[in-house]
Amino acid sequence: MSDDIGKLNMPAVVLVRPQMGENIGAAARAMLNFTLDHMRIVAPRDGWPNPAAVAMASGAGRVLDAAQLCADLPDVLADCDYVYATTARGRDLTKPVFSPEAAMGDAAKRIKDGQRVAVLFGPERAGLENDDVARANAIVTVPVNPEFASLNLAQCVLLMGYEWMRASAEVTDQTVEMAGTDWAKGQDIEHLAGHFEDRLDEAGFFFPEHKAQSMKINLRNMWSRMPLTRADVQMLHGMMRQMVRWKERD
Amino acid sequence: MSDDIGKLNMPAVVLVRPQMGENIGAAARAMLNFTLDHMRIVAPRDGWPNPAAVAMASGAGRVLDAAQLCADLPDVLADCDYVYATTARGRDLTKPVFSPEAAMGDAAKRIKDGQRVAVLFGPERAGLENDDVARANAIVTVPVNPEFASLNLAQCVLLMGYEWMRASAEVTDQTVEMAGTDWAKGQDIEHLAGHFEDRLDEAGFFFPEHKAQSMKINLRNMWSRMPLTRADVQMLHGMMRQMVRWKERD
């Protein structure tokens, strides 16, 4: 992911494996209604650029023009400090669960502190997979009628945008103090997770076979939920390297 | 207007001179997402019932089935105690102007007091006329991007529904929660820290000697700062045990 966006003063809207171009265009409109114009797209089903998206976006076409296309989620999150995953249903992953209002209030504070923030939206039909959610720091769930919960992609983006605009208006005149902490970024966590996963795989940790995938997701989820500093990440890398040296010593 | 609705425990959604049937259907869906199911329709352009509305509503068809058709606005408002008019732009009318949140908070209080409340939405193209707005008690305006304000009818209904559900449920879940989480206790963390420290000591991690103490402190500090669950702690113990087995294997 090229680091060409400078200071991002709003959450990035990340569409993960979107299906219909029309929905991408409608999401762009929903974003721009509430001043969001930084879109990232991960592996769109119908390729990119997408004429159906452009047709639907009409006045919000510039959001699509500036959208960043990424091959996978780790790529898209590499430069992000904090990531919210929108999900309709509860997950078995231990993560903070925010309402849209609380999430965007939190995002506004983080952005004011100079952090980069992203919100993930899953594919239209099935939503985000657990593997996607495991890479986020927190979950956002819109409280809907449990007997009729049919929010589409653009509506979900619309509600988050609405809360973003409310939150950013409130935070602008508050002073939020800067924490001097050097937090690990998305790509640091990704490398750390990959390092541990590889070594533990060699060591035969992910056993039995049929549980390996969920063990890996739980581990990913743990890393992304932890408030790790760069120093923590270095220490954890060092621990693992030392265990390997220890094994190889005799 | 027949008085057959008894005590109305939610705001009536009043579509004033709606044009496209599809938009009426989409409004019904948006309503039901947030538990609103009392719709009133004033002088729809294409008559009533409207097959295009039914097709679009799909799972929310019962909102349309129960919708009340009225000839004009005075008729529809006859049984209402308090009426909010949604408008995109400011009007030259002296009226209280609410945000969606404030309006629905106000509505929830009135309904609790036994009042009947309605929210007016204008025709797609031009919105409510001043003559309509003049019949309302208050104005509601959604704060949108002044450079791109393209909310459609169903989106406007969606945002009001969202605020209604928050207000009525008194969704005070602004507090972040991690539902059902079994957090590790102090002694669990202590055992974990001790386990890692012992094994890492054997492995020669705390090196050079004069830095060993501060490295141990940093590690302890990291564990105690992390929001670890019991499951996380078990996984971390398991990781370390597996590394030892791996070492001892050959």
Image: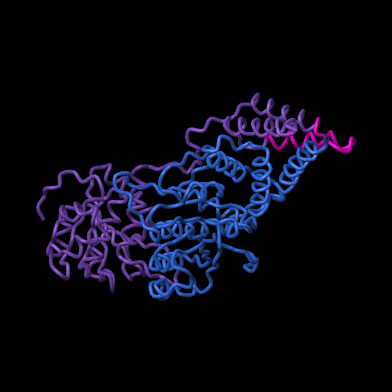
Chain colours: A blue, B purple
Residue A98 placement (x, y as % from top left):
49, 46
Residue A247 placement (x, y as % from top left):
77, 36
Name which quarter of the figure residue B82 lies in. bottom left
- Magenta segment, principal secondary structure? helix
Question: Residue, x 62% and y 31% (percent of image)?
Answer: B233
With A148 as the anchor, is B181 left or right in this view? right
Is residue A19 positioned above or below B108 on the image?
Answer: below
Magenta span includes A54: no
Name which quarter of the figure residue A154 lies in. bottom left
Is residue B221 positioned above or below A16 on the image?
Answer: above
Residue A103 placement (x, y as % from top left):
50, 50
Question: Residue, x 51% and y 53% (percent of image)?
Answer: A104
Query: Quadrant of the image for the N terminus of chain B?
Result: bottom left
With B122 as the anchor, is A216 left or right in this view? right
Residue B30 or B195: which is nearer the viewer?
A: B195
Magenta span includes B219: yes
With A207 as the anchor, is B152 left or right in this view? left
Is residue B249 positioned above or below B58 on the image?
Answer: above
Residue B18 or A56: which is nearer the viewer?
A: A56
Q: Which residue extends farthest left?
A: B2
Extent of the magenta region:
B202-224
